[in-house]
Image (cartoon, helix red, strand yellow):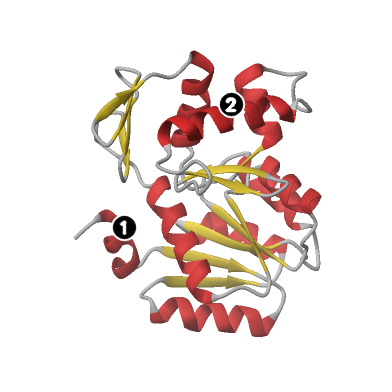
Amino acid sequence: MTQENEMETGGARILIIDDEEQMRRLLHVALQAHNYITELAASGAEGLRQTTLFRPDLLLLDMSLPDMDGLELVKNIRGWSQVPIIILSVREAEQDKIAALDAGADDYVTKPFSMGELLARMRTALRHSAPSDSEPLLQFDDLQIDFARRQVRVGGKEIRLTPTEYDLLKILAANAGKVLTHRQLLRMIWGPGYEKETHYLRVYVRQLRHKIENDSSRPRHIITEPGVGFRLL
């Protein structure tokens, strides 16, 4: 059995922080049907307390809580924990998504959502947060990245990347499944002061897609989150 299936069938611990009783009940029933262990919290303070006591493997967090904004709670938790956090929110504005991801959330799902989509995003977050004893070599279908040798292969064939292209791919791969905002990527690759130079990213993402995607017009690996950033799958 794969680690991903073990996580789902073996009972990953999920903390649901949402002030809507109906939403808490819906998620509780649906996730337990998929063998997750759930704990519920109706406020930010309760959620913070349960994060400490319940020790969840993943948080599902609503942005609008009665006692604090979800963004404040994300920042608080990120001060001492790297537990995956998926935001569930009715807020659709790009600036809300960017603010949540910049604060440290791993993903952002807009309400209403399908349970299938949420479960897929949860599996991705849990898979990439799980500790690994393997060598620094990552495989994404036909794409292989060897951190130790700084080698990238597609379908077994080595692909030559420029240093900047490699840095971009390495950062995306190290955070696979997680949305990285334009600001985060620009700061990590080019440094402070470049957070608004989004044209840099457009150029290098386009070049990278031409090299690693079978069809750069329909990318399977580097996925665009419109107006927000990119993720690697």
| Residue 50: quadrant of the picture | bottom right
Q: At 29% across and 67% down in the image, what residue appears?
A: 10
* Nearest to the observer: residue 15 or residue 179: 179
Mark linked to residue 12? none
Please give left or right for residue 198 compared with residue 107 in the image.
right
* Nearest to the observer: residue 122 or residue 65: 122
> What amino acid type is highlighted by mark number 2?
Tyr
Check contact, mark 1 vs mark 2: CB within 8 A: no
Query: How far separated are the C-alphas under marks 1 and 2?
Result: 32 Å
Quadrant of the rendering where the N terminus is positioned: bottom left
Q: At 38% across and 63% down in the image, what residue appears?
A: 12
For the image shown, how many numbered marks are present on the structure?
Answer: 2
Reading the image, the residue beneath label 2 is 204
Q: At 63% across and 27% down in the image, what residue appears?
A: 203
> What amino acid type is highlighted by mark number 1?
Glu
> Which mark is in front, 1 or 2?
2
Residue 106, percent across and down? 57, 49
| Residue 101: quadrant of the picture | top right
Q: Earlier in the sequence, mark 1 or mark 2?
A: 1
Reading the image, the residue beneath label 1 is 4
- Tell me the SS state at disc 1: helix
- Residue 62, compared with residue 194, is above or below; it is below
Residue 84, percent across and down? 52, 51
- Tell me the SS state at disc 2: helix
Question: Callout 1 environment at 10 Å: few (<14), some (14 to 19), or many (20+)?
Answer: some
- Residue 30, compared with residue 126, is above or below; it is below
Residue 21, percent across and down? 67, 82
